[in-house]
Amino acid sequence: LVFLSDRSGNNDVWLKNLETGKETALTATPMPEIRVKISGDGSKVVYNQAVPNQQPAIYVVSAQGGVPKNVCSDCGFVLGASPDGNIITYGLNETPIRDFTVEVESGRKTEILPHAEVSPYRPVFSPDSRWLAFTASAGSGPRKVVVAPFRAGAPTPESDWIVVTQEPGFANQADWSPNGNVIYFLSDRDAGTCIWAHRLDPTTKRPVGQPFEVRHFDSARRSLNNLNNADISLSVARDKLVFSMAT
């Protein structure tokens, strides 16, 4: 598990081994880190470092520790990474939101989901790196959970987007099951913010059946509504769901 903690004075990147319980600081910098993700294979950690008067810088470091690599200065907010950690997704908070990839070795940047009106939120790589899952909306309209093919170095036009489900209100934080055949996401279709999922055809990634609820939160003390939805950071692991909760 990777997470941010200010226990040393400002936000640094920490790693916790869930088998041993050991926690290790991966960064110890005077500038705070503000976003962090771990690659699907567990080998690399990507994160943002705040920079005064410009977009955040993007770094990558081995999950075993070592010297971080500055992948991109004055870049944008880290959204995720490919399963091997060699491609990083990041976004610019514009209207509509614009999402990009940057390749760790070459530094090549590509806008991946361009649209004049629709904002694609937090695209996440499928386990085989062939697809992206994200939520999308235009203005204050309802959110859609979407899957789109990923082509390295090239954008994916809206004509290739596959709408998995359109939520009546809020939806966010789409992520894949380990086999790539289920999309998990946050939705408020049942009053409060809860975790839902939708099955996909294994080959075409088109939706199969109807969305189903995975975890309901119905008390004021244990509620996802206690956090800004961007801070929940829903992630799907091999045998568990990982997310932040305020009590």
Image (cartoon, grey):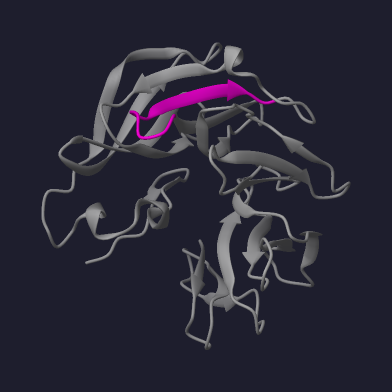
Q: Quadrant of residue 204?
A: top right
Point 20% across, 55% down: residue: 223
Q: Is residue 199 left or right of residue 149?
A: left
Above or below residue 6? Residue 225 is above
Question: Relative to 201, is 49 above or below?
Answer: below
- Where residue 112 appears, as percent x and y from the top left, is 68, 31
Q: Position of residue 239 (x, y in %)?
A: 41, 44
Q: Is residue 184 left or right of residue 74?
A: left
- Residue located farthest toward the right when viewing the structure as drawn: 106
In-image side of 41 versus 206 (left or right): right
Residue 65: x %, y % from top left: 71, 71
Comparing 243 with 135, the one in front is 135
Please state which of residues 227 and 93 is positioned toward the viewer in this rendering: 93
Question: Does 132 sit left or right of 241 as displayed?
Answer: right
Q: Nearer the viewer, residue 117 or 147?
A: 117
Q: Residue 212, image x and y in percent?
A: 26, 26
> Which residue is situated farthest in the left direction here?
219
For the image, the number of numbered tags is: 0
Q: Residue at x 79, y 63 (%)?
A: 70
Does residue 145 show up magenta in the picture?
A: yes
Membership of 165 in magenta stretch:
no
Which residue is rendered at x = 39% and y = 39% of the image? 172
Identify the residue at the far bottom of this view.
9
The quadrant of the image that shows the C terminus is: bottom left
Residue placed at 43% from the left, 52% from the top? 233
Query: Magenta segment, which residues?
Result: 138-150
